[in-house]
Image (cartoon, rainbow, N blue to C red):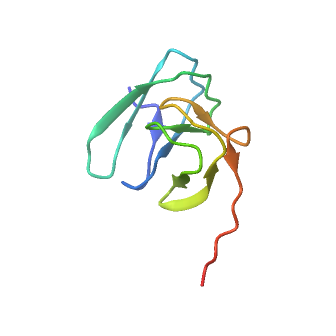
């Protein structure tokens, strides 16, 4: 059963479409129609982000194909991604 969505092939986070408890399987389909899964290592609230792969501290967080911040700590695949481990970064847009 799919319980998460991802929009862009470049995304390193997906969004849970139902609450997911630590230890449960998170499953989604990428735009190329490939199914992926990862085990939740933390509880993921509904409509919150989780890492689809390990993300190193300082790496850009990419959601819907856009940078939304930077990892403030190493984030494991299946871990909740939110204000406790993401830092806002002002990017030069010009």
- Left or right, 38 with reference to 69: left
- Relative to 16, say whether 93 is above or below: below
Quadrant showing the C terminus: bottom right
In percent of width and height, residue 71 lies at 61, 46
In percent of width and height, residue 45 lies at 65, 30
Question: Going 58% across and 37% down the picture, which residue do you hit?
Answer: 74
In percent of width and height, residue 66 lies at 53, 62
Question: Going 60% across and 26% down the picture, which residue do you hit?
Answer: 19
Question: Going 50% across and 44% down the picture, which residue do you hit?
Answer: 13
- In this view, which residue lies farthest toward the bottom? 94
**Among the 4 quarters of the image, the one containing residue 21:** top right
In percent of width and height, residue 60 lies at 55, 55
- Relative to 89, say whether 53 is above or below: above
- In this view, which residue lies farthest toward the top? 23
- Left or right, 6 with reference to 79: left
**Among the 4 quarters of the image, the one containing residue 44:** top right
Question: Going 46% across and 47% down the picture, which residue do you hit?
Answer: 12
Quadrant showing the N terminus: top left
């Amino acid at each position: 059963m799919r319980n998460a969505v991802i929009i862009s092939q470049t995304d390193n986070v997906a969004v849970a479409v139902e609450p997911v408890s630590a230890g449960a399987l998170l499953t989604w389909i990428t735009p190329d129609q490939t199914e992926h899964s990862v085990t939740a290592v933390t509880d993921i609230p509904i409509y919150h982000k989780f890492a689809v792969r390990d993300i190193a501290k300082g790496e850009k967080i990419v959601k819907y194909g856009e940078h939304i911040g930077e990892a403030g700590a190493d984030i494991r695949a299946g871990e909740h991604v939110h204000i406790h481990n993401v830092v806002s970064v002002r990017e030069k847009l010009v």
